[in-house]
Amino acid sequence: MSGYSSARMIKDPRARIIGKESWRDYFLLRLESPRIADQSRPGQFVMVRINAHHHPLLRRPFSIHSNSGKTIEIFFQVAGLGTDLLSQKSLDETLDILGPLGKGFNTEAGLEGKTVALVGGGRGIAPLYFLAQELRSSGAAVRIFYGGKSQADLPLRENFEKQGFTIFCSTDDGSFGFKGFVSDLLKAELETFTPARIFACGPEPMMKKISGTARQKSIPAEFSLESVMGCGFGACWGCVKRIKRGDGEEWLKICEEGPVFSAEEIVWGEEEG
Amino acid sequence: MTDLSVDLGFIKLKNPVIAASGTFGYGLEFEPFIDLNLLGGFVVKGLYSSPREGNVPPRLVEASSGLINAIGLPGIGVEKFSEEVLPQIRKYDTALIVNVCGESEEEYGSVVEFLDKNEGISAYELNISCPNVKKEGLCPALSPEATFSTVSLVRKITSRPLITKLSPNVTDILEIAISAQEAGSDAVSLVNTFLALAVDTETRRPKLANIYGGLSGPAIKPIALRMVHQVASRVNIPVIGMGGILEGNDALQFLIAGAKAVEVGTANFIDPEATVRIIDELEEYCQKKGIDRIETLIGSLKT
């Protein structure tokens, strides 16, 4: 349905880490990989090999957080062994990465002069920076909604502010901004404006709520889904999501057909039963 | 220049490295990364007579040096494969092996009967050993009788070479291999994945929706090697070895233990160029050791 399909997947065995920032357990790595950067679109991802050993065995998927044309950034929170080891990498070390993978957000269709809402929950903010920049340069007015458990879970707020984006924040504990979920903050703000499209990424319950709100208000919405992935390029069939296609539903590969799907396509919560 | 070719009797491979079923899609997924012509062969994902959805997610969980999967053999089915995929992949100068599945013995037969009408297939690999499609990993490869009867039925239908893929989840894999041989299989490939469980201690639920899955990757390599050695020493048909091959050195171990060729599986997920890299590493080893023909290594384990 939406977005940009990866014409060319590239293995870059030596993407050099040329920048590293960290906040508590959140990390931002800048990688020099001109060939992958050149092909990458917002919403696409890379698969990163953690080390050359057997453990952890699989690569880890990360959304492309920003793209300078020669470098890309990945943003992550330490959530297990893979991200823990990755967080310990130093400047000038190299990473073996595959990308760009998947289909990104649909930024092509007539958003010029329109207002759009980008909603990120926790580490789900990762793909939205690249998307925000791309949408702004194509003439859209971008409003960012960024939610986390507490103030320390909003590490990228300042980066968005520095770039002059309008940003609305929420925290579950009320330590910064709106007290409550970012889905509720968005719902409240939608009383004051109607975006031409909503783009969101975050925990599934958050995206499910936003999908409901968008449907009530007849606003088109797109979601970037997260999943454990075996390969990232369609070979293992490991990362499926229930998706409506034609008259029926199918388990579609998130890595190949997504990770971005539109609100009408996604069957929420099917696999939790 | 080392001669890397291996002769399985029913087919000669340009080198002993075959991409394993279920880890290589339909081959097309790897076109962006490698030249498929360089491979000894590749086995396409298991095919049933109809398209299949596969299991409910989560389908994958990582283990120590391994991967547990319960994908459940989703696929496009034999008709769509023949019409849309086969014309794109049979152009490659490599052995194209089709992995054949069935809910029943008869289905294995009908899948092969359908595929027999199509040109360009070098051999069938009978997947009688997937642990993820029936309760508790039940499959024909767990019993010598079911193995014999499934292979016999297919043997009567086709004159194309048959490779029977065996399960390690048995007391005596040699007994099953002999059943496959007696039923007319041209080769056996082993091992499929080990039935496994991962537990989430927060929720006390299995980490896979299917409860059990199949363990693959380096974690299983020593057991797979032992089984390959046991079977290769006793059967008269070629053994294709697999289980945790990530490097050329792993492949060499299987060849020395008696495998005439190897299949590379989980490694394809981690490094889509793994098969080609392993072929290069085999050649490097042979050159370094002054080995002219890689076939001389096969079964050369000194015991």
Image: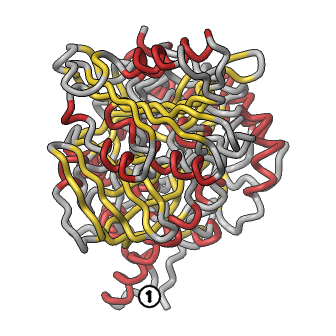
Question: Percent position (x, y) of residue B96?
Answer: 66, 56
Seen from the viewer's position, the closer of residues B278 and A18 is A18
Compared across the picture, whether B24 is left or right of A179 comes to right
Seen from the viewer's position, the closer of residues A210 and B243 is A210
- What residue sits 77% from the left and 55% below the top? B88
- Kindly identify which residue carries mark 1: B292
- What residue sits 83% from the left and 47% below the top? B118
Q: Quadrant of residue A20?
A: bottom left
- What residue sits 48% from the left and 19% below the top? A189
What amino acid type should be assigned to the residue bearing mark 1? Answer: Asp
Question: Percent position (x, y) of residue A144?
Answer: 45, 35
Seen from the viewer's position, the closer of residues A96 and B98 is A96
Question: Percent position (x, y) of residue A82?
Answer: 24, 47
Q: Is residue B297 visible?
A: yes
Q: Secondary structure at mark 1?
A: loop
Seen from the viewer's position, the closer of residues A155 and B232 is A155
